Image (cartoon, rainbow, N blue to C red):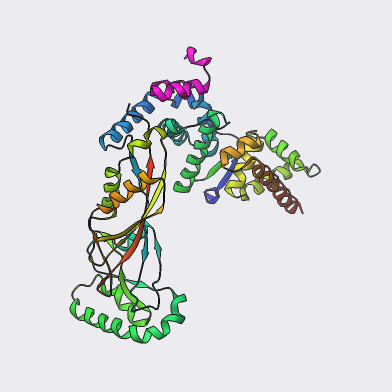
Amino acid sequence: MAMENKKVKIVRHIEHLHDGAKHSNFEALYDQYTDYRATLVKYKIVGAVCVSIAVTAIIYLLASDLTKPEKIQMQTHELMRLAPKPLQHGLATRLPDRLDPNAQIKTKQSELPVARLMEQKEESTGSEEAVIPDTVSIDTSPSMSVFRAAQPIAGISHLLAYLQANIIYPEAHKPDSISGTVVVGFTVLEDSTIGAIKVVQSLGALFDEEAKRVVRHMPTWQPAMQNQKPVKQDFTIPITFQLFSEQP
Amino acid sequence: MNKTETVTDQELIERSKKDHRAFEGLYERYFEQIYRFVIKRVNEPTVSADIAQQVFFNALTRLSSYREMGHPYSSYLHRIAINLCNEYFRKSKNQRFVLMDDALAESLIQSMGCADAEHLQREAALIQALEQLKSKELMLVELRFFEGYSFKEIGYLSGITENSAKVKTYRILKKLKRMIDGHGK
């Protein structure tokens, strides 16, 4: 139909406009709600909740390839796309063009190691075809390097599930039922430990402590790799505290 | 449901916070209204029923954090409905529908202050102009002229201030008028 392309259609008559009562079914709604509550209780979400949506990563590329660390913001879904399968080979990351003026001097230094590295890689991993098309293109542009973002070994969804399950709403604040977000920044160091945990956006001392606690004990990360060398990488995680109504 | 007829929304909300079954009173009171609000935009009975049901589900799960902010509870429900409709359109890329009859078209044309052109031609031009509006603009026209909301309510429903709702609406009227006049020539 030709009209299908239009986003909006003005009509003079709408069928079933008065059929609302036919569809109304409070019992179904109540059942759905009861199920929902049961799920909350099952996963201990009632009363103490974290809903964490996005992990933002700040990537520091090795200073040996650049004059200054470049910050690239990534959201969770991009991280997931970059690293669809944990513990796989690196992906080629193109550096932004605007770095070129600075990078030109560097280019000559970095060109060789990168190119050499690539040759080595082609030789040594010649049989592993999947990654090579990505990395071969590196030869054409000197200001490129191989970078793979750090990632939780068990995957980002596992990390989010861990946060969901382990965050405890501070008991002392329950009467106030404060809801809000603590943004916690941390660094995944070269040896895969978590360092420099700091609160970027605070929601009060108790919330901050709790957020830092779960981040400190979170599942192990695999460090970011650049040119097959581990590098540190900064991340931020927003942790949302929200108090659902008391248990039914 | 007779006993809830005389109870105010606020009392029902307070009661529902303690006993979720009491939410049925609010549900019965507003389901039809929300359903019509949704089906006018979606024009699809089963989808509308789902969205309307979802509105009440969302309202029920967020009941504990609901606070009276000088707007009736029905506005709160409509606000959820608008957001869910927008989400539906965004996800499904389906067509938006706007219900408009002759009387509404006439009143809109009068609000724009053009009275001279040929009746039928004018209305065709109006429909064409409306279809060209952005979805947010169309929503304001719809709420204000077809559904008769006050600017205060429109502001609340679309998450802007009363004043900017007013300013935006009249700006859109001017734009519509320009489009129709341009079409006539």
In the rendered image, the residue lying farthest to the right is: B116
Which residue shows up at 52% across the image and 15% down it? Answer: B5
Which residue shows up at 24% across the image and 68% down it? Answer: A89
Residue B92 locus on image (x, y percent)? 45, 47
Q: For this rendering, which residue is in front, A180 or B122? A: A180
In the rendered image, the residue lying farthest to the top is: B3
Q: Quadrant of residue A233?
A: bottom left
| Whether residue A19 is visible | no
Magenta-highlighted residues = B1-29
Q: Quadrant of residue A149?
A: bottom left
**Residue A246 versus residue A159 in the image, above or below:** above
Q: For this rendering, which residue is in front, A34 or A59? A: A59
Q: For this rendering, which residue is in front, A5 or B173? A: B173
Q: Locate residue B127 relative to residue A185 in the image: left or right.
A: right
Residue B165 locus on image (x, y percent)? 64, 43
Q: Locate residue B58 relative to residue A197 in the image: left or right.
A: right
Q: Is residue B21 magenta?
A: yes
Instruction: Name the dominant secondary structure of the magenta segment.
Output: helix
